[in-house]
């Protein structure tokens, strides 16, 4: 994949709120910090809307192909999250018509874009009595996602049990918002849509999850006037994924396919899909950065939690720092190469007198146009303007894509500071479980598992992978330390029921969800 | 030294070679061979439980064609010994030895002249080399030809652990390998399927028998190892020889040997071996020989925790004869942690946590039994159960520590000592108490598996004898499952297994959306029943009328204990996180397989105050 191959690029969109447009040209608009469950919900919200409009997983390249109208589920959200008095009303008025009337009055405080959505009287005909209605509200409130720690009612969400739960983000006045849905989930969807693998199978699995007739979704819809979620009046658009093709898209598709193939109920599969999406977005960022710099696929050296500081931990800390640095360097490199290949800038630099103020001004304007820099880069020489522009671009990177990279590593369960002052790659149990679920279809040797993780993702755990030239700093390579690291992995997998020791030198890694491994 | 003493010393030297001193397991065989040559004392030997399976393949008496044999198994399962037995059966011909543990010989069999190739250790074939050497690859091709019938004159007998075999036939086989080698690879790649029995013949077109020694029950190995060590004639020299030091009549060696020979201790060890398999541990011959020899020769003061039959060993045995009671040695108390942690037998025993748990009844007996002279009943019971200690194995400090405890004169150090002494005493009772004098089931309360006794007698033994566990017990298991899988405090005995999910995910801690149920149908409980699997271990089987395939899972001791504890009121998550996760995966698989499509209507479950399941349809229009 060549990041500078402009034939392999989608329509470039712009966002007036952006300060510059370099990170976006490298990784897309945009990758930002986002909890994995919100990443998943944003992904599902876009995928469902595409499904509704008959475009599910069709590679979206142009701006119009990327736009969609998500569900809002206005009444459902008001009932579940802006309805504090329901239990008190039941207690005060009992299971009576007065209770309904009192509740309708209380719900006049609900928020909606259309007045018609503030009328809840239809509910009286849908439930046997007020107490039944209250118990359903209570039941549904139990699946609200507490991990999000949402303080505002409009940011509260329920677990994705049906399409009506994949609603879009709204602010308090029910206008569109971008605090929760940062577009990273949309990028994950676009990555999957542009992949070339397992389209039919993944589509079929997602369609099953989007079944509006499933009993759980019907329960959600009963709370809404039209027995269906209301839909946004305007298109959501502006998300930009630069490359039409990318090996990371296919890698993501392989894993999503492997996960759906386990035939778990959709909500169960989503539990694993959320961190998996975060992992693949991180991997996409990392590998794209390496491609920009013309470097080989970067390694991800993982420490399996050790009781004390070891060379593996040191190698892992160093690897994480190197990978983060790789992204920073790729921004500078991309800036430089784009500048060098821009005819207008090259003309200014080669034909005009750099000492002239007008040349500096032209250069400043050319840079602004090329990289969509919002705040004018200051400086009285070309060099100063360039440095200030780069500074502003780096600042923008640090706040968006750079922060997003760390967030995705955290959300996937790969980055941790457990037992250490510094961050390093130290996978969580959840991460390891997801890796086994998507990579193991029949019992495989532990050495084979390690080599799969290395070949597919660049993950380094055992000595064989660590010994490969250029993988880690030779100072940190101690064969026995990496052997112990691999042993710790196996012990953890055994304890989690994901591996079985067959003899002193042989362990099978097993996928407990597949039928063949039942024990 | 008199001849008996010399002979006794030689015997102990041989035993010492099997004890846990050596970390390099490969060196054990060399050391044993050396001692055997030097002293003339025969190594520890018994007929391998799988020998007839091998003989049937390579030396059939019924005129059947000869088969190649690949012997798999955990290191220490006796693969090499079994091959030696095979060679003896073939007349012990003079063999041509080649590097890499390969032997060749030609013999005349009932089926005509045959060329035999014995490969003793395929695991060592590659060594540090990144690829298998060409000459050895040729042998693999020759094996493939023999297995696929291309070469009927050559018969192979190979020992390997499954990892090595996998490596040679997968990683090392070049892409242009002949078709016969590819076929052989196919067979081996299905190994985990076909090797579910001790002996399996592959398809009739393939001329191969696979012997998987890991499938032999640990109990069978334990029986053989105990017999092979304890019934050796050499013990007479020790018992009647007027030795000193390690050979003295009061040395821990002789005392521990005598105790090991008692029926109670032998039965206890066989029970533990049976439980090892039920916990997913396979105890190899090497492991068990190590366990038994350490129980005889172990001593906390000795080098590496094991007494040697030399001047140093004599001095320790003489000066500290009481420091090495059997109940401490058997659990590896004299060994360093690094030595215990590499041996499955000690890892298994530490999982049981014998002596670490207790009951009020037992501790009353241990603490007050020795000092309360007014309670005659307690005294009688103490004399029968605790003081019954003819070989002086009991910790002599325990009575004085108990006295200090009762009078409240304990400092921190003494408290710790008392705890340790009580733990050791519980181990002693667990090992030596005859189940007839003390309720055998109660002794399991000293372990982490309070219900192991019920598991053994009511499930394992009953199923193996062709019976079925009582409906009462199955109802209790179902009661535990209902609590774990629904998150509700339902009745501890249940007539139906309820399948519920959360409104969000299948494994929600409180699962109150009803999917279906399986009712127990009377005495035979065909819908929910227990059967034995290929390893003769219990499985729980669920049948639904709508699904063709039953859902089964192995009821290991850990799972059974967890179910019983939860049925008795323990909170699943606080009792064991590992077991909770295990049952969550089981639930996920079970619901996926038995209820592939969710019901059209949502029904909520809510138990009443008596723990009876109630149903509440969610009415909406």
Image (cartoon, coloured by chain):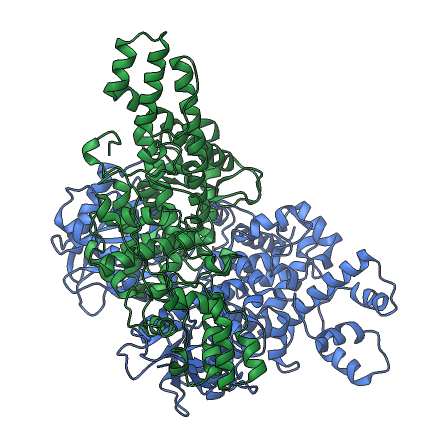
Chain colours: A green, B blue
> Which residue in the rendered view is the most extreme toward the left?
B150
Residue at 56% from the left image edge and 38% from the top image edge: A309
Up-down: is B386 above or below A278? Answer: below
Residue B224 in sight: no
Q: Residue at x 45, y 71 (%)?
A: A140
Q: Residue furthest bottom?
A: B522
User: Which residue shows up at 30% across the image and 39% down it?
Assistant: B99
* Residue B407 located left or right of residue B302: right
Of residues A165 and A371, the one nearer the viewer is A371
Q: Is residue B583 above or below residue B34?
A: below
Q: Quadrant of residue B173?
A: top left
Quarter holding residue B393: bottom right
The reply, left or right, for residue B136 in relation to residue B305 is left
> In the displayed structure, does residue B319 sit left or right of residue B541?
right
- Is residue A215 shown above or below A259? below
Q: Where B443 falls versus B493 (above or below)?
A: above
Horizontally, is B330 left or right of A217 in the view? right
- Which quadrant holds the C terminus of chain A? bottom left
Q: Is residue B313 visible?
A: yes
**Residue B579, percent from left and from top:** 50, 66
Quadrant for the N terminus of chain A in the image: top left
Number of numbered callouts drawn: 0
Of residue A348 and residue A492, the one placed in the foreground of this image is A348
Determine the residue located farthest toward the front in the rendered image.
A115
User: What is the x, y in percent for residue B197?
Assistant: 32, 67
Which quadrant holds residue A325? top left
| Residue at x 39%, y 48% (from the top left corner) | A278
| Residue A72 placement (x, y as % from top left) | 36, 61
Q: Position of residue B251 (x, y in %)?
A: 69, 58
Q: Nearer the viewer, residue A90 or B67?
A: A90
């Amino acid at each position: 994949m060549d990041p500078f191959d402009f034939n392999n690029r989608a329509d470039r969109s712009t966002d007036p709120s952006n300060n510059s447009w370099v990170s976006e040209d490298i990784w897309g608009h945009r990758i930002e910090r986002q909890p994995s469950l919100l990443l998943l919900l944003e992904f599902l919200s876009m995928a469902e809307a595409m499904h509704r409009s008959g475009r599910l997983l069709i590679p979206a390249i142009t701006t119009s192909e990327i736009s969609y109208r998500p569900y809002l589920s206005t009444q459902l959200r008001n009932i579940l999250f802006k309805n504090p008095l329901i239990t008190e009303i039941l207690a005060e008025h009992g299971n009576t018509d007065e209770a309904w009337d009192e509740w309708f009055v209380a719900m006049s405080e609900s928020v909606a874009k259309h007045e018609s959505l503030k009328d809840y009287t239809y509910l009286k005909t849908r439930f046997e009595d007020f107490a039944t209605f209250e118990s359903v509200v209570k039941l549904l409130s139990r699946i609200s996602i507490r991990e999000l720690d949402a303080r505002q009612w409009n940011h509260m969400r329920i677990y994705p049990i049906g399409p009506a739960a994949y609603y879009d983000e709204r602010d308090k006045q029910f206008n569109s918002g971008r605090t929760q849905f940062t577009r990273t989930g949309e990028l994950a969807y676009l990555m999957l849509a542009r992949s070339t693998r397992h389209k039919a199978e993944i589509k079929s699995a997602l369609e099953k999850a989007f079944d509006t007739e499933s009993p759980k979704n019907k329960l959600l819809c009963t709370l809404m006037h039209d027995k269906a979620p209301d839909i946004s009046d305007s298109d959501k658009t502006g998300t930009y994924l630069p490359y039409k093709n990318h090996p990371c898209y296919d890698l993501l598709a392989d894993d999503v396919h492997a996960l759906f193939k386990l035939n778990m109920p959709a909500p169960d599969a989503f539990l694993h899909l959320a961190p998996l999406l975060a992992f693949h977005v991180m991997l996409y960022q990392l590998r794209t950065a390496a491609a920009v710099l013309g470097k080989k696929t970067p390694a991800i050296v993982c420490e399996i939690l050790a009781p004390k500081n070891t060379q593996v931990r040191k190698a892992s800390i160093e690897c994480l720092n190197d990978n983060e640095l790789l992204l920073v360097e790729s921004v500078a490199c991309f800036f430089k190469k784009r500048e060098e290949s821009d005819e207008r800038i090259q003309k200014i630099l080669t034909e005009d007198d750099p000492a002239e103020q007008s040349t500096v001004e032209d250069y400043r304007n050319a840079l602004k146009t090329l990289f969509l820099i919002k705040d004018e880069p200051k400086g009285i020489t070309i060099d100063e303007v360039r440095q200030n522009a780069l500074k502003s671009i780096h600042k923008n990177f640090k706040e968006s894509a750079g922060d997003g990279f760390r967030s995705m590593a955290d959300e996937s369960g790969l980055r941790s500071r457990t037992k250490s002052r510094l961050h390093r790659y130290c996978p969580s149990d959840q991460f390891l479980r997801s890796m086994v679920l998507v990579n193991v279809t029949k019992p495989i040797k532990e050495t084979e598992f390690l080599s799969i993780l290395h070949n597919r993702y660049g993950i380094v755990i055992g000595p064989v992978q660590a010994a490969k030239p250029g993988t880690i700093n030779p100072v940190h390579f101690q064969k026995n330390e990496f052997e112990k690291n691999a042993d710790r992995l196996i012990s953890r997998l055994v304890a989690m029921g994901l591996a079985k020791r067959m003899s002193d030198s042989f362990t099978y890694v097993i996928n407990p969800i597949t039928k063949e491994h039942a024990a | 030294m008199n001849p008996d003493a010399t002979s006794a010393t030689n015997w102990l030297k041989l035993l010492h070679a099997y004890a846990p001193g050596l970390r390099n397991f490969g060196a054990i065989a060399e050391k044993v061979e050396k001692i055997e040559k030097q002293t003339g004392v025969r190594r520890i030997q018994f007929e391998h439980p799988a020998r007839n399976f091998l003989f049937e393949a390579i030396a059939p008496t019924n005129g059947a064609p000869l088969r190649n044999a690949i012997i798999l198994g955990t290191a220490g399962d006796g693969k090499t010994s079994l091959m030696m037995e095979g060679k003896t059966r073939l007349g012990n011909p003079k063999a041509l030895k080649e590097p890499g543990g390969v032997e060749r010989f030609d013999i005349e069999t009932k089926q005509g002249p045959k060329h035999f190739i014995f490969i003793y250790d395929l695991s060592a074939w590659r060594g540090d080399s990144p690829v298998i050497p060409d000459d050895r690859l040729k042998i693999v091709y020759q094996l493939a030809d023999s297995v696929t019938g291309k070469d009927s004159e050559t018969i192979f007998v190979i020992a390997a652990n499954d990892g090595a075999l996998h490596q040679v036939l997968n990683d090392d086989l070049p892409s242009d390998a002949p078709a016969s080698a590819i076929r052989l690879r196919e067979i081996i790649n299905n190994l985990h399927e076909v090797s579910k029995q001790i002996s399996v013949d592959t398809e009739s077109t393939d001329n191969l028998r696979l012997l998987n020694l890991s499938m032999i029950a640990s109990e069978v190995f334990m029986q053989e190892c105990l017999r092979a060590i304890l019934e050796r004639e050499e013990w007479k020299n020790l018992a009647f020889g007027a030795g000193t030091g390690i050979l003295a009549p009061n040395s821990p060696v002789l005392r521990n040997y005598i105790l090991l020979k008692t029926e109670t201790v032998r039965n206890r060890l066989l029970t533990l071996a049976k439980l090892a398999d039920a916990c997913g541990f396979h105890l190899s011959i090497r492991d068990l020989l190590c366990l038994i020899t350490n129980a005889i020769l172990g001593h906390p003061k000795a080098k590496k925790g094991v007494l040697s039959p030399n001047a140093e060993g004599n001095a320790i045995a003489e000066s500290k004869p009481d420091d090495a009671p059997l109940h401490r040695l058997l659990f590896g108390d004299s060994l360093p942690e690094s030595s215990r942690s590499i041996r499955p037998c000690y890892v298994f025993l530490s999982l049981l946590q014998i002596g670490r748990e207790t009951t009020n009844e037992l501790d009353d007996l241990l603490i007050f039994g020795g000092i309360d002279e007014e309670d005659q009943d307690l005294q009688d019971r103490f004399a029968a159960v605790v003081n019954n200690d003819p070989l002086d194995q009991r910790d002599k400090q325990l009575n004085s520590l108990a006295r200090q405890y009762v009078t409240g004169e304990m400092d921190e150090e003494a408290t710790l000592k008392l705890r340790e002494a009580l733990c050791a005493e519980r181990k002693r009772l667990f090992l030596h108490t005859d189940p007839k004098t003390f309720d055998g089931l109660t002794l399991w309360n000293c372990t982490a598996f309070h219900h192991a006794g019920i598991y053994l007698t009511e499930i394992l033994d009953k199923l193996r004898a062709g019976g079925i566990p009582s409906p009462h017990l199955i109802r209790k298991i179902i009661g535990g499952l209902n609590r774990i899988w629904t998150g509700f405090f339902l009745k501890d005995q249940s007539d139906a297994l309820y399948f519920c999910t959360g409104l969000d995910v299948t494994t929600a801690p409180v699962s109150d959306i009803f999917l279906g149920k399986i009712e127990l149908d009377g005495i035979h409980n065909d819908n929910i029943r227990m059967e034995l699997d290929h390893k003769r271990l219990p499985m729980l089987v669920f049948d639904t009328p709508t699904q063709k395939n039953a859902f089964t899972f192995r009821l290991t001791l850990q799972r059974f204990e967890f179910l019983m504890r939860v049925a008795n009121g323990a909170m699943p998550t606080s009792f064991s996180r590992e077991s909770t996760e295990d049952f969550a995966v089981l639930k996920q698989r079970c619901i996926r397989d038995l209820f592939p499509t969710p019901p059209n209507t949502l029904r909520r479950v809510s138990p009443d105050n008596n723990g009876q399941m109630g149903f509440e349809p969610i009415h909406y229009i």
